[in-house]
Image (tube, helix red, strand yellow):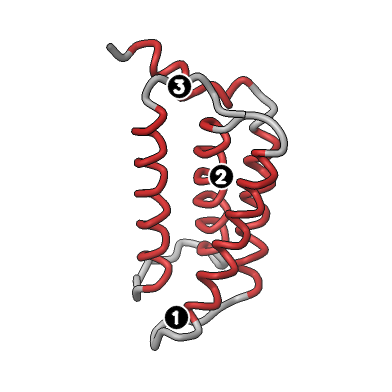
Amino acid sequence: MTSPLRYRWFWLLLGFGFILAVGIASLVSINLSTHFSNQDKLIHAVVYAALTAWFMQIYHGWPAWGVIMLSMLVMGLGLELLQSLTPNRAPEALDLLADGVGITLAGVVAWTPLRYTLMKIEQVLP
């Protein structure tokens, strides 16, 4: 079910921009300074939680949430497979697991009032 967002097209465009940015960042060589082991797994979980939650605010309820969650997991798998074709990146099963953790977290958050964040933002927009 679609949420009653006035700027739905804008939120979708922004969301697809975020997906494009994640795709690019997943395939280019990025040197992040690590402060603890497996920091990249935390980044995977946070990014996929944010992306999934973003689209779950635009489309409410089941089965839309299931489609969004599955789509994000497929995207994560696809990007991991594409990394095997790049010279400086390598696919990792734990990255996909971290993606799944983030997606699941977004699914839990979707049952809270946080799912109305974009609607609340729109209330203060002209």
Q: Quadrant of residue 89?
A: bottom left
Amino acid type shown at disc 1: Arg
Number of the label disc, if any, that sits on residue 89: 1
> Are circles 3 and 2 on residues that touch, CB within 8 Å?
no
At horizontal 41% and vertical 84% (from top left) the residue drawn is 86
At mark 1, the secondary structure is: loop
Q: Quadrant of residue 41?
A: bottom right
Marks 3 and 1, the one that precedes in the sequence: 3
Marks 3 and 2, the one that precedes in the sequence: 3
Number of the label disc, if any, that sits on residue 55: none
Would you name the residue on which mark 2 appears?
52
Residue 115 to residue 22: above or below: above
Rounded to the nearest whole Å, what is the CA distance between mark 2 and mark 1? 24 Å
Rounded to the nearest whole Å, what is the CA distance between mark 3 and mark 2? 17 Å
At mark 3, the secondary structure is: loop
Rounded to the nearest whole Å, what is the CA distance between mark 3 and mark 1? 38 Å
Closer to the camera: disc 3 or disc 1? 3
- Dot 2, how many residues are within 10 Å of its Cα: few (below 14), some (14-19), or many (20+)? many
- Dot 1, how many residues are within 10 Å of its Cα: few (below 14), some (14-19), or many (20+)? some
Give x and y (percent) for residue 3: 54, 24
> Are circles 2 and 1 on residues that touch, CB within 8 Å?
no
Amino acid type shown at disc 2: Thr
Give x and y (percent) for residue 49: 57, 46
At horizontal 66% and vertical 24% (from top left) the residue drawn is 112
Report the front residue among 37 and 51.
51
The C terminus is located in which quarter? top left
At horizontal 57% and vertical 66% (from top left) the residue drawn is 38
At mark 2, the secondary structure is: helix
Amino acid type shown at disc 3: Leu
Number of the label disc, if any, that sits on residue 5: 3
Give x and y (percent) for residue 60: 62, 29
